[in-house]
Image (cartoon, helix red, strand yellow):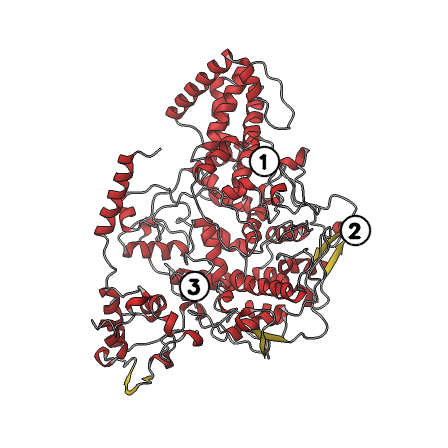
Amino acid sequence: MISALGILCVAFSYFAFTKQSKEPAIPEVVDFNYHVRPILSDRCFKCHGPDAKARKAGLRLDTEEGAFAALKDDPTHHILVPGDPLQSAMYARITTTDTAEVMPPPTSNLSLTKNEIEVIRKWIAQGAKYKKHWSFIPPTKPAVPEVDDDLHAVNAIDHFVFAKQASYGLEPNEQSEKETLLKRVCMDLTGLPPTLEQQDRFLKDNAANAYEKIVDELLANKHYGEKMAIQWLDLARYADSHGYQDDGGRSMWPWRDWVINAFNKNYPFSTFITWQVAGDLLPNPTKEQLLATGFNRNHKITQEGGIIEEEYRIEYVTDRTNTFGKAFLAITLECAKCHDHKYDPVTQKDYYSMFAFFNQVDENVQPNLVSPAAEPVMKISSADAQTVLSFLNKKDSADVMVMIMKDSVNIRPTRVLRRGVYDQPSDTVDMNTPSSIMAYNTKRFQKNRLGLAQWLTSRDNPLTARVYVNRLWAEFFGRGLVKTTGDFGTQGELPTHPELLDWLAVEFMDSGWDIKKMVKLMVTSTTYKQSTKQTQQKFGTDPDNKYYSYYPRMRLNAELQRDLILSAAGVLNPEIGGPSVKPYQPKGVWESTTAGRGDLAKYIQDEGGSLYRRGLYTFIKRTAPPPAMLIMDAVTRDQCEVSRMRTNTPLQALVLMNDPQVLEAARVLAERTSTQNLSEEQKIEKSFRLIVCRTPTDKERKMLKEYYTQEKIKFTSKQRDAKKFLNEGELDHIQTKDIASTAALMQMNQMLFNIDETTIK
């Protein structure tokens, strides 16, 4: 527990730091995108932005035409007069002391700081130049900056990062210890800890390319696709149940197998997303291309009676539209469903023009209670799994029905819905995209989802490549170059390294959208290989580590914590793909959230090898997701999620201390180690290396031996307690000579599973 004195010290440090912090310096040249637009977006656009219905006084500040217009009530004055702040009505209104005139008005509870007012004044004085929002300008490849040779930059990433650090008086850390770096890259590329053989081999390899060889080995590993798929499953809102009240099961696991295979085979990202958006519209589509379109059928589907079918059909199309905007464009399209977007140049008409692409599916709105799929579907036979879909892990001979996309023969007209309500149609719209992002050229792109996919993967599209490389960066570095990975709009954060982001985006497209090449570029950079050591100077200059002067300490996500524990214990089932599994779970979780009917009314735990599958194969019932995973910040998969929250709660520690899977892993590892011809010291060291993934220090060896001895003495005097403690899990017990020693090893293993270093990378 934190003492009252500790809380006071933390509070004092915080206030001392904030008191010393100053507003950023006024830039020499004020840029609209990086200095002015954020101010206007936060304080002005709600009343003077894109939403015509919310606009006050007919005054618009988000466009050049609106900002340079004359005042409606006084045509002799203009909102902005380039080069002359004193003649600009905007400057007069933000500097006046008259509460009836000042902007933003006091009733808004918003205000501008002196620095912000000075930024606007200087911008007007410099000509008040407007620009398109930075993310809507197609990226171009900037020159790579020069940096000091002593910093050991190995690729362009390091040059951009180190140049930015230098401008803030920062330098990169030294490289991490080899064992630490090995665990980091193994967890990042396969989601599994390094084996003892990998640890020994890497430590002995002193070649200059030793690390690169490990990276190549991991990229070729069959588990790479599983690790990469986890983030995509969140984004695609993959689950094993339909959602809503009855929440019956569905059979979408073949689509998950396809995603894993696509990452392993390194499909170009352009192909990867084209097949998912519109594989069914390709010429003579294969079964694999049809299966890929399951991406757009992962949304929730109701099985309740008495519904209004059109209401739910509109919900499904809305979900597909919103997911497209968030997953591929990182734009909050959903904000324009009911009205023009209040901050971004996306109108309600734009929203329903995008909606029109996904509005052509002739779908069964309401499957029955036991149906695993709703039309349109594709039947997958055992013959398919042995031939055209050989990557599938199909376990039985029964056909699998998977939901896919298939447009109806006739075009369904799409209407703008007043306030987004299904029974309030108004104007008819055609398939189109927001011109503010990129005009939809019908001479280049067909008017269907295939054309939309071509628009998405066009070299002229300013968002697609940026959004994905930013997401990859966030996966490996803890935060995106654009921190708001799901929002590249005006309310999102500005990129910390805009030149690097553009360089990566163009490099990605130039490489043929090669995902593995981009991943390798990131994880072989000196920036990635840094130690996590922090200094007071670095923390004071860059408390959020936006400039990457050290590697961030990040807790493993829910699936990977499970995978590490099972792998360390030697019980992980390495099987790739197949139907989802139901491991240990507290009793009554499903039963308390069900209507008492349907195939998922009761939780029936799996047995045997299915209990030890990787975390991404855990069965996800939307109304009652796996509780241990939720506690570790997994998402419910109700909707598209591009990033997970990071929280710290006592419940997380309780899971690691009490979850049957953790206790069983600790027990099995203890039993296996106990039967090996090793000294007590060697057994302790082996367990430490398997769990923590490095060799313990002399101090750690001493502490662990003392703890082990203490527990052994306790269990020697309480043999019944030792037997009870070892009675965890369903895996067969391995008979050991000394129960007390085995129980002591289990206690030590459980403690090691709980330490901070184990659960981070």
Front-most of 168 and 251?
Answer: 251
| First-in-chain label (3 vs 1) | 3
Q: CA distance from mark 3 to mark 1?
A: 47 Å
Q: Nearer the viewer, mark 3 or mark 2?
A: 2
Residue visible at 51% across and 13% down?
718
x, y percent for residue 405: 68, 63
The circle drawn on residue 70 is: none
The amino acid at mark 2 is Ala
The amino acid at mark 3 is Asp
In contact (CB < 8 Å): disc 1 and disc 2? no
x, y percent for residue 409: 73, 73
Residue 616 relative to residue 15: left or right: right
Q: Mark 2: few, some, or many residues within 10 Å (few <14, many ≥20)?
A: few
Front-most of 751 and 705?
Answer: 751
Label 2 SS: helix
User: Label 1 belongs to which residue?
Assistant: 586
Label 3 SS: helix
